Amino acid sequence: MGEKGMIFDIQRFSVHDGPGIRTTVFFKGCPLRCAWCANPESQDRSPQLLLRDNRCTTCGRCLAACPERAIGIAKGKGRRIDWRKCTQCLRCVATCETGALSIAGREVTVTDIADEVERDRSFYETSGGGVTLSGGEPLMQPEFSVSLLRRFREMGLHTALDTSGHADRSVLQAVIPLVDMVLYDIKMLDNEKHRQYTGVGNAFILENARFVAQSVRTWFRIPLVAGVNDSEDEIQRIASLARGLGVEKISLLPYHAGGRAKLRQIGRSAGAFRGKPPAVRHMARLRSIIESEGVASTIAS
Ligand code: SF4
Ligand code: SF4
């Protein structure tokens, strides 16, 4: 039980997902739908078709593989997918020799990941790093998370969990004792605004933040979007919460627009949201506000 899970990426040599040099495992599946999400292919739990149109040679091989006739080639427009017809059967992917059709998401075992993580042990040891479970939301696959964390503990590795905090308390109680630290995402404090931008309210998330911070070494992470959650008052209040909970550090993650292109690659509309990162000077001001509360700060990516 819990020996297999669904991920969409493993990133080696991460330096923004906890202390030192780390390997970050990105789980697939997330209960939130943040308007600014940099990895929208992480949101659905199932594997899904991902397009790289710049690799398509319009050879036409994929057309015959599609039982739904969802693929067409239009003169001057290249290969097109009719996403209303696509059932995500993924049969077309094997016919494409250029990588223009690929799959976001793959099932892996605990041993697959442990073997990958083991490759960089010397970097963890010299830098004080380790392995981070991120996503998506690792707590949406609690049994797999627990199995992985137990294996990492047997391997003597430092472990971190990057979470939205949107999980049942029973899941947190199972996972938190197995991690050395938590990177806890706080987007904003207002419940209705949180619902507007992420699809869920945050009362539950803030309650869980208290539990986590009281249980284990915790850093907050704030994805910062200009005009959405980067006011001095917002950051002051989050920093004050962090100080009260004994949170060690707040990492600011300025918005980047990479998620918009990825939305199109998986057949979703980029929608009306147009994010911008805060100006560099404003970020420096926000850091000084955090540090005046006695909480360390950093800018990550
Ligand atoms: S994944 Fe979609 S486009 Fe590809 S073969 Fe299946 S239905 Fe057709
Ligand atoms: S098989 Fe690949 S390269 Fe050929 S038309 Fe389909 S997507 Fe393009």
Image: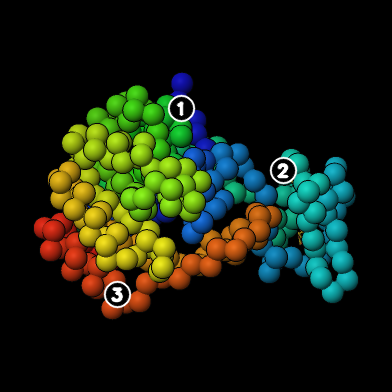
Left or right of 271: which side holds 201?
Answer: left
- Where does residue 136 sit, x and y in percent of width and height? 47, 45
| Residue under pointer 2 | 88
Q: Is residue 184 left or right of residue 94?
A: left
> Does the numbered disc 2 mark a residue whose Cβ is under 8 Å from ligand 1?
yes
Amino acid type at image mark 2: Gln
Q: Residue 193: in sight, yes or no?
A: yes
Q: Nearer the viewer, residue 235 or 56?
A: 235
Q: Is 280 located above or below residue 185 in the figure?
A: below
Q: Residue 197 placed where, x, y %?
A: 48, 53
Q: Is residue 274 left or right of residue 211?
A: right
Q: Are marks 3 and 1 in contact (CB under 8 Å)?
A: no
Counting residues from the N terminus, which is met first, the one under dot 3 or under dot 1?
1
Screen quadrant of the C terminus: bottom left
Q: Secondary structure at mark 2?
A: loop
- Which quadrant holds residue 138? top left
Q: Nearer the viewer, mark 3 or mark 1?
A: 3
- The residue wearing badge 3 is 282
Q: Look at the numbered disc 1 and give the secondary structure of its residue.
A: loop
Q: Is mark 1 within 8 Å of ligand 1?
A: no
Q: Say few, some or many: other residues with alpha carbon within 10 Å of mark 3 (under 14 / 14 to 19 / 20 or more).
A: some
Residue 252 coordinates in the image, percent (x, y): 30, 62
Q: Position of residue 192 (x, y in %)?
A: 43, 48
Which mark's residue is nearer the viewer, 1 or 2?
Answer: 2
Q: Residue at x 39, y 29 (%)?
A: 168
How much space separates mark 2 and mark 3, taking CA atoms? 43 Å
- Which residue position holds label 1? 3
Q: Given the image, on which type of amino acid does mark 3 rest?
A: His
In this rendering, would 275 be left or right of 130?
right
Mark before the other along the chain sequence, 1 or 2:
1
* Element carrying mark 3: helix
